[in-house]
Amino acid sequence: MCEEIELYFSELEIIEYFNNQQGIEVINADVIYNPIQSINITRDSNLKIILETTSKIGAETKAETIPSGMVYTNTNEIILKNKFSERTFVLSSVTPYSCKISISNNNHERIELSSIDSIKSTLKTSIEEKYLIEFVSNMDMKNFILSDNISINKSINETTTIGKINFRDTTTNEMKSWGCITNKINNCSFHICRYEKNSKIYQYILYDKIISDEERKKIRECISFILGKPILYLGYCTYSEDFKMLSFELKRGYDFKGACTLAELPPTILNLNMSNIIDSNIFNNLLISLYTNYDKYDFQHLFWMYWHASTSHFYSASVQFGGCIESLQNLYLEKNSSGKIIESKEIWNNFRSNNMDLINKLRINESEKDLLKNKINNINILPQQKLLEKLFDLLQIELTELESKTWKQRNIPAHGKRVENNIEYIRGVKILRTLFNRLILKISSASEYYFDYYSLGNEKSYNLRLLEDGIKDV
């Protein structure tokens, strides 16, 4: 039996598709009570995927009691198969957390709730995958107008056109046009889409070819930085040349403990006219610049810290943004200069050797000598303030007195000290975030401008500055 051709642009539609499956067979129930009578999945407001199963009272489980406080890798897995379509479903990292008995008309059944990390489905077929739709959240872009178009042409069938890709569907709606952003990296075209249709919000990225999870993650994280708000990944589905769905995967979302509450704060302009229309050429150039430097400067690690800092309380955010800057600073100096006081290896080795000889001659115990030797080994590193100044000098951008003062105060909470002026410290966090933005943009050669989120702008926008100009207290 062949599956009907239907298009899914939302992960909620994939969830509905799964819940409506007929002819499901349980190949492996693992930690869930089995035999399973019914199975259903939902996604809650925290982006967790919840599995609900029902079984008779006499059902059994292979679940073992996990000691409280134990840290372990969850390998629990449920495998299902549709006997009509040859489609399999694998539910991974299954964790049962609730079980209750329901009594209705003298019929007793067990209702069990479990969290799962992912649900992955594949269709046993030789058909080649052609297109990929990546489901995301938190990509609101409500303050922007997207410059490219998604059009729906109403005829007997409905055709959704995104770039050069035409999706055919059998549903009918009024003719409409929505925005998207078309991009291209390494001969791969993709479209960043966000719109509302039939009272539903759609947020996804459409790829015109199949690329790896790793590459798509790089692209998502670069897009997030450009938009100034982290995109939350929820899964994907793939289609054949004739738009038959071949595989899908839904993932548990992670929101950095508050990403949905963040405002969109792009690091630089997305249109030279300073309008809210995103220029797809400018956006694509930014994306290519960031993507090109992603591995060289470990943007995966930097962006991970950056978004956690963005969602943190200001008291700890200063330390975290400082950590972002230090990490980028160390990577750049390692690849392009050094963080040493004495850069000549010959001079340093002579200095070190002479001092080691002096320590060995001292009439102190060996443990005290070891402490002194460790001090000698670590004294050839520039202080953090001098490292930052050296980085800005190498990049030929200004480090102002205000920025330098803020940098010196970033670790006050890390040492358990009291913040005396909350307003000043909160504004200092804005400086640290902006400093990081400037460094990323400069090192990536992504833009000549940056938004100054410290200085007060007008009622519609923040101040725009040249990258080489620092933030001054006016």
Image (spheres, helix red, strand yellow):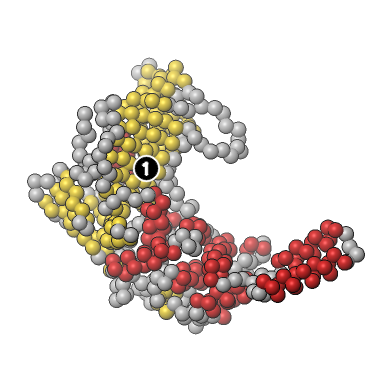
| Quadrant in the rendering for residue 371 | bottom right
Question: 184 above or below 55?
Answer: below
Quarter of the image with the N terminus is top left
Q: Percent x, y for residue 60?
A: 47, 20
Q: Nearer the viewer, residue 143 or 124?
A: 124
Mark yes or no: residue 303 visible: no
User: For numbered disc 1, what is the local secondary structure?
Assistant: strand
Residue 66 lies left or right of residue 126; in this view the side is right
Residue at screen point 25% across, 27% down = 84
Q: Percent x, y for residue 337?
A: 56, 72
Which residue ends up furthest to the front in the rendered image? 346
Which residue is disc 1 drawn over? 250
Question: 385 above or below 204?
Answer: below
Residue 333 lies left or right of residue 184; in this view the side is right
Q: Nearer the viewer, residue 138 or 349?
A: 349
Residue 82 lies left or right of residue 430; in this view the side is left
Residue at screen point 42% across, 79% down = 466
Residue at screen point 79% across, 70% down = 355
Q: Percent x, y for residue 428?
A: 54, 71
Q: Residues within 10 Å of mark 1 (few under 14, many from 20)?
A: many
